[in-house]
Amino acid sequence: YRFLLSMTKLIEDIKQRELHIDYKLLEANMASYRIRQLKKKVEKNRFIKYNVFGTKTGRLTTTKDSFPILTLDKKYRSLLKPNNDWFIELDFNAAEIRTFLSLAGNTQPEGDIHAWLGKVAFADKYDRETVKKNVFAWLYNPNAENEYLDKIFDKNKIVLDHYKNGFIENPYGRKIESDRHHALNYLIQSTTSDILLRRMLALAEKIKGRKTHVAFSIHDSVVLDFCDQDRDILVGLVNEFSNTKLGKFKANVSVGKDFGNMSKLSA
């Protein structure tokens, strides 16, 4: 209840903050019907309105009268500019795989997760992209087998630990009705969502009373509308974001003067 109450208060705060939208990018392409429709939509909906009950797994969705933050094409993200000085985006390195590692009882590697798996599971046999492809193909197909990964991780045991009487229950107490086939997917996705939302709440608490505020969240990231005078707390915010209930997750940090041009910083 306390979690839902806090999330409701935070998304209400986000909903009250009008976005700083630069229409120049759209106005230069008004010959396109799609762009005209997008311009009409964002002119009408200049606020982000989340629904905390929109999905089984707890991921945020938006209402019909919201700015389309979750579906906005990446090439039009430059429309969004901060009301303060910068956008700072915090996201996890391979969030769902890190969640799986914790559920499997593994400690979190400090570096890139795919590089780590390439070494410990595949003995550096494949490049990073091949490792990534193999891991996701194995992880999200309950029937998939992988001679390297199956030696280290027991997917079946993880499911048995959290799946009872037709429901999965994640480490945060979220219960989702599921068949056996989808149980691991729901477990990983809901746990990752709960991790992110709680880190977003923790960030909001850390910046309470400052000009910096939570602007929005997209998938596995939180974007802050950041004020220059709050630079003294940036490192602390990154650490707060990284320290999850399931271990310290490596965080990626990006900064930009608009949401379409974000540059990565070293976390």
Image: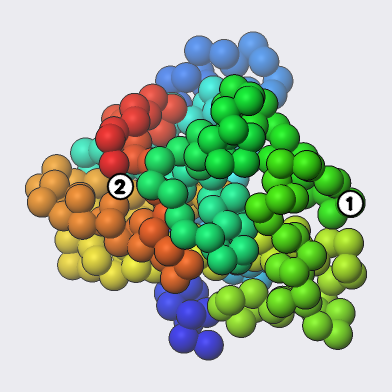
Q: Position of residue 79 (x, y in %)?
A: 44, 30
Q: Name which residue lies at 39% across and 59% down.
A: 248
Query: From what the image shows, is residue 15 above or below residue 170?
Result: above
Query: From what the image shows, is residue 55 above or below residue 41?
Result: below
On residue 254, the disc is: none
Q: Name which residue lies at 57% across and 13% down.
A: 29
* Residue at the spot of label 2: 225
Q: In what element is the residue under mark 2?
A: strand
Q: Position of residue 118 (x, y in %)?
A: 57, 34
Q: Position of residue 191 (x, y in %)?
A: 60, 66
Q: CA distance from mark 1 to mark 2?
A: 43 Å
In the rendered picture of this protein, how many numbered marks are placed on residues? 2
Alpha-carbon neighbours of circle 1 within 10 Å: few (<14), some, or many (≥20)? Answer: few
Q: In what element is the residue under mark 1?
A: loop
Residue 64 in view in this figure? no
Foreground residue among 204 and 152: 152
Type of the residue with mark 1: Asn
On residue 143, the disc is: 1
Q: Name which residue lies at 38% across and 47% down.
A: 110
Report which quarter residue 32 is drawn in. top right
Q: Is residue 209 left or right of residue 50?
A: left
